[in-house]
Amino acid sequence: MLQNLETLARDARSWPFEQARNLLDHVLKKRLSDADRVAAKLLIDAGKADEALATFEALRKPVLLETGYGPSGLPHMGTFGEVARTTMVRNAFRALTGDHWPTRLVAFSDDMDGLRKVPDGVPNPEMLKEDLHLPLTKVRDPFGTHDSFGAHNNARLRAFLDGFGFDYEFMSSTDQYRSGRFDAVLLRVLERFDEVMAVMLPTLGEERRATYSPFLPISPVTGHVLQVSTLERDVEAGTITFDDPAGGRTTVPVTGGHVKLQWKPDWAMRWTALDVDYEMSGKDLIESVRESSKLCRVMGGVPPEGFNYELFLDVEGKKISKSKGNGLTMDEWLRYGTPESLAWYMFQSPKSAKSLHFNVIPRAIDDYLSFIDQYQAQEPAKRIDNAVWHIHAGDPPKVASPVSFSLLLNLVGVANASTKEQLWAYMARYIPDATPESEPTLDRLMGHALNYFDDFVRPAKAFRAPTEQEAAAFRDLASRLRALPTDTTDGEVIQNEVYAVGKAHAFEPLRAWFGALYEVLLGEKQGPRFGSFAAIYGLPQTVDLLERGANGDLAG
């Protein structure tokens, strides 16, 4: 079975598998000689990845995938997207190489950065103002729950990732600098200072070039992260000298956490010191990736394989900005939609710009549900490219929800429901054996539908009066449904009657008939499959709705 999975993975076309194959080529090239790389690739292509692992010791070191996090704020949509997408690549790599190839996913926190400004929406802003320029792990926690602001936000990050079930290792920049993990590469940066500057200076403006140094010393007096020139370098002693605004001319070692690096050299140093094999980033960082890759080579490292994803846009097509608040937060998505629907949205076309707004959530939920349904009927070669294979690490649920989210939204509105219990009362007629315990996804969707309807659908509903043609068709459909057994729950039987009435009353095109049902009866431009809706809502209730719509009572 494993060999078959590896074979399928070699031919899979979805983007995580494309990235996994690129990552595999990167690892083979980085770790093996040309001859050994050819031999290993032949084994892997023959479905013998385990044999390649046993043959070449260099391949047994874990493949390291990394994501980065700036803990000056709380985890956000981009944090989820980057970890979710990187996890998809990791799972695809495992399928390609077999479970015995070791991999690691590191969530790295840049918590040694200096606090540059007081974030919005935090308590005790005056306290934070006093701590500006200190490393985040030295800034006092305004929430009063942790030793520092950095520790507080790191804890939030870990809780955030744990809540979604991500498999990762947390790593703190402060811990790595202070432990000496980065010392060897920091000394190399000192030794190759001029080469580092040759990469960085052409990227800077004239004023910044005059004072730029890749080293940001930590003031022994104030503890601030200083943006100052390096006046002297002693490679043999491993030190730099600078002017400390609080202490005058000062010399400190570049090791042991006495300095940190500017962010691009820091990124490159981390790739080198940790031997990172893969890291993706947003399209806005393409130039930064290019520069950091050059710096990585200067430091004696090999830049990781990478992937640049497109950024999200707001409802008006403008770039989302945290400072403007024109995006969608994690808490907002999870009020109206499931984590799986968000993962589905992150999976789709990561190189294409997409709107990230409330209006995309219902479609994302229903698309996710439809992909679950499709998966069960697909052949293995199609399954492995299905988004839900990646969302669920190759083991998606066998069933989704018996009812779509869009149908639930309309049921909430027509039934004037305000609780799950009211919705389950309707479901008892349509799916007699269903309970919140047997249909947990449906139960969750009911809660999301109630929230979404109250906040977005109800305020936007606009009912209109029917035309004479539409009113006659509504009465005809009511008469036909009244002739069916009142306990009919077969949506197809009801849908056939809906089609028959539309044709009998000469709606041209036929979609105009369905538009009339939605606009007059539901107060919306679009709606669910009407037969399924009527089956859940109940025939007597649907007949009453049709008659009130025909009389113009719903238009108010």
Image (spheres, helix red, strand yellow):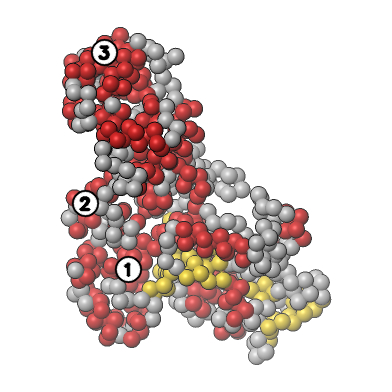
Q: Work out which quarter of the rendered image holds the N terminus and state it.
A: bottom left
Report which quarter residue 12 is drawn in. bottom left
Nearer the observer, disc 2 or disc 1?
2
Residue 328: x %, y % from top left: 51, 45
Tell whether 434 sits left or right of 150: left
Secondary structure of the residue carrying tag 3 is helix
Nearer the observer, disc 3 or disc 1?
3
Q: Residue at x 27, y 15 (%)?
A: 474
What's the residue type where badge 3 is placed? Arg
- Mark toward the start of the polypeptide (3 vs 1): 1
Secondary structure of the residue carrying tag 2 is helix
Tell whether 335 sits left or right of 379: right
- Residue under pointer 3: 475
Q: Residue at x 29, y 81 (%)?
A: 53
Report crowding for label 1: few under 14, some 14 to 19, many 20 or more residues within 10 A (C-alpha). Answer: many
Distance, label 2 to label 3, CA atoms, is: 40 Å
Is residue 8 or residue 293 the one in the foreground?
Answer: 8
- Residue under pointer 2: 376
Residue 235 to residue 379: above or below: below
- Residue under pointer 1: 93
